[in-house]
Amino acid sequence: MKPFSTTALQIPRSGIREIMALASEKEGVIHLEVGQPDFPTAPHIVEAACRHVRNGQTKYVHNAGVIELREAAARYFQRKTGVTTTSQNILITPGAVMSVATAFMALLDPGDEVLLPDPGWPNYAMGSSLLHGKAITYNLRSENQFLPTIDDMEALITPKTKLLLLCSPSNPTGQVYGPDLMRELMAFAQRHDLYVLSDEIYGEIVFDQKHTSVLPYDTDERTLIVSGMSKTYAMTGYRVGFTRASVDYTQLATKLQEPIVSCGVGFAQLAAAEGLEGPQDHVQEMRHAYKQRRDIALKVLREYNLYRYTPGGAFYLLVDISSTGMDSRDFALRLLEEQSVAVAPGNTFGQICSNHIRISIASSKENIREGLHRTCKMIQEIARNGPGRSE
């Protein structure tokens, strides 16, 4: 029998999902591995979804998404950025991950190079590879607080460089890019005629400063902003993402959705529209809770002399395990086995943080406190005694 696709076979599995699958087979695990809000969807959004199902909104919808959500998303982006936005600038996708994949489909020809962050969400590299793009990573170094530097990025430019991908607040670092950095990044993209794909799915989860979108610095419509309902509104299972882009792009990408997903889920999109336009109290409550949890995590890290930086948003932070001398995947597997704590190995996000693990603070205060105590104790034990197995 002829083999499967070489491209498909060479893509590694996400280390996040690997740990998640193993943890699901073990009882009593403290889950700090998955970036999923542990809050319920707000009652008025749940009721809206049920109402739209009862009213028969269970059929195919427009490839670009229902007009109610496209209009609501347009108003959201205009409120947030001050940039004029209409429903024609909005494409609705089944989850923000599909927004990213659709962008790769629309923009990349075989061999085109994509500048991706290292560390960065593994799905970026997986998606670009599947669509025959070439991933070129720019470094987010710990000594620079996991922020990009233009000089490093300049050295990566070739005639084949076509797309720059940004993520702020960042997964996995939680760092937030300020206005000056966003302005510099857009100037860099314009200088080299690059499209910019800005993943702003965590844009409402910021703690110490206002979130800065790259959109206000885009003067020639080269930017695609990816966002959605999953993180901010605790709606991961509803699968509602959206892209804000030029009209030329949304028209092309609408066509591309048809052979892949046809369209999204109508009643989920209608409920999402009510989520964007309705009360935002629950969003503020979740943001406040995540900030409290971040501060608890940092307090524990300081107790063990493992504090390195303060993430400004999202619900992640990286923990330095370099003192153990262990590969992050090996450490994560051992932590799960010996301490019943599930974390994401840093090397699933790239080589820069292969000596880190990612903690998700989308969990209870008790789980964060206890899980990090167990984690830090194991780091210290291995640092003292070496990576040999505990007796």
Image: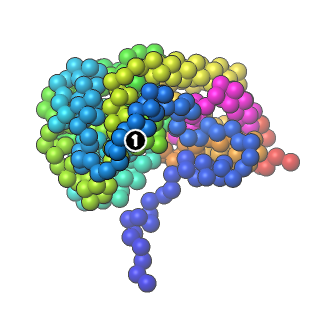
Residue 386 seen in this snapshot = no
Q: Quadrant of residue 301?
A: top right
Q: Nearer the viewer, residue 136 or 47?
A: 47
Q: Position of residue 49 (x, y in %)?
A: 41, 37
Q: Position of residue 100 (x, y in %)?
A: 33, 45
> Image point 59% across, 23% down: which residue?
293
Q: Which element is circle 1 on?
A: helix
Q: Is residue 308 magenta?
A: no
In the shown orientation, is residue 389 left or right of residue 212?
Answer: right
Q: In the rendered view, tell whether residue 267 sits above or below residue 10.
A: above
Q: Nearer the viewer, residue 165 or 273?
A: 273
> Image point 26% across, 43% down: which residue?
65
> Image point 35% across, 48% down: which residue?
58
Q: In the rendered view, tell whether residue 71 sits above or below residue 209.
A: below
Total number of numbered discs in the rendering: 1
> In the image, what residue type sits under mark 1?
Arg
Q: Position of residue 157 (x, y in %)?
A: 25, 44
Name the residue beneath numbered marker 1: 54
* Identity of the residue furthest to the bottom in this view: 1
Q: Which residues are magenta?
A: 353-380
- Colour mapping: rainbow
